[in-house]
Amino acid sequence: MATAHQKPPEEIVEPTPDFAGLIAAAKQLDEEAIEQLYRHCLQVVYRFALAHVGSVHIAEDVTSDVFLAFIEEITRLHASDEESLLAWLLRVARNKITDLRRHASTQVGRNIASLDSAVAGQLVQSIGPAAEDVNDPAAIIERQQEWAALASALSTLTEEQRTVIVYRYILDFDVDRVARLMSKKAGAVRALQFRALEMLHKHLKRLEFGTSRCAFERGGRHE
């Protein structure tokens, strides 16, 4: 605990990795480079999968499959920087989730047919509580309840709308980055985001949980 005579600990800021160098080394099967890329991209892939499937176990399986595919394809990978690598990883994740959804008659298919409130706590944990909520357990519980409603509401969106919401408010990507990842113009991304938020708001209003929309506005970008 810091006293009047002690400086508080400074926040540790990790240097930005040299992605071009790491990817080049990884293509030569450099284990350390592969591990660094894995550590850097793991949470992005996991959060993306979790927000789409609504199940911690399935999200973990999807994430594992994505990085197995990464290892298998590393020498043939065309990615050369962080953005192109993430685009490739998230495309693989999306394809694997789509394949799982096709098996609607299986237990896995039923689990991801819609998002349930069990994902809310994991979303809050992975994103972290809002700064003003850190020392307020009641506020944290209220936020978890909001995310529970939002997680359920996400299943009402189209795949593209859900992807935009995940990129913007869960992964906290800006509009230009989302546009590049989705191969769309920034205006198209904003239009998708607007329609998605309107649909979420209507769904939450039907659930009499209108304030839940604020969770996205607190938890991500809303330019």
Image (cartoon, helix red, strand yellow):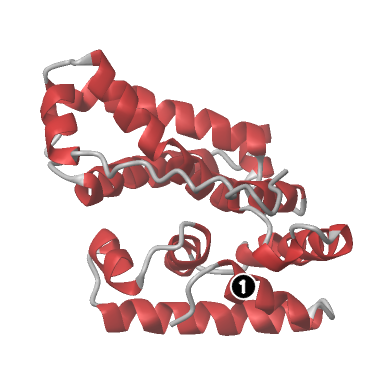
User: Left or right: where does residue 148 sit relative to residue 56?
Assistant: right
Q: Quadrant of residue 14?
A: top left
Query: What residue is shown at x 77% (from left), y 54% (from top)?
Result: 117
- According to the image, label 1 marks what residue? 218
| Residue 57 x, y percent position in the rendering | 64, 32
Between 194 and 168, the one lying in front of the other is 168
Q: Quadrant of residue 95?
A: top left
Residue in the picture at 18% in, 31% down: 22
Q: On the picture, is 32 further left or further right than 111? A: left
- The answer to whether 26 appears left or right of 113 in the picture is left
217 vs 202, nearest the viewer = 217
Where does residue 139 sit, x and y in percent of width and height?
82, 65
Residue 192 seen in this snapshot:
yes
- Please tell me which residue lies in front, 132 or 121: 132
Residue type, label 1 = Arg
**Which residue is depicted at the point 29% across and 65% down?**
177
Name the outermost residue toward the front: 5
Q: Residue at x 65, y 50 (%)?
A: 5
Looking at the rendered structure, the secondary structure element under dot 1 is helix
Decide which of 17, 150 is in the foreground and name it. Answer: 17
Vertically, is 149 above or below 114?
below
Looking at the picture, how far across and down is residue 193, in whole percent?
45, 78
In the rendered image, the quadrant that contains the N terminus is top right
Is residue 69 at all visible to an observer of this figure?
A: no
Residue 218 x %, y %: 61, 72
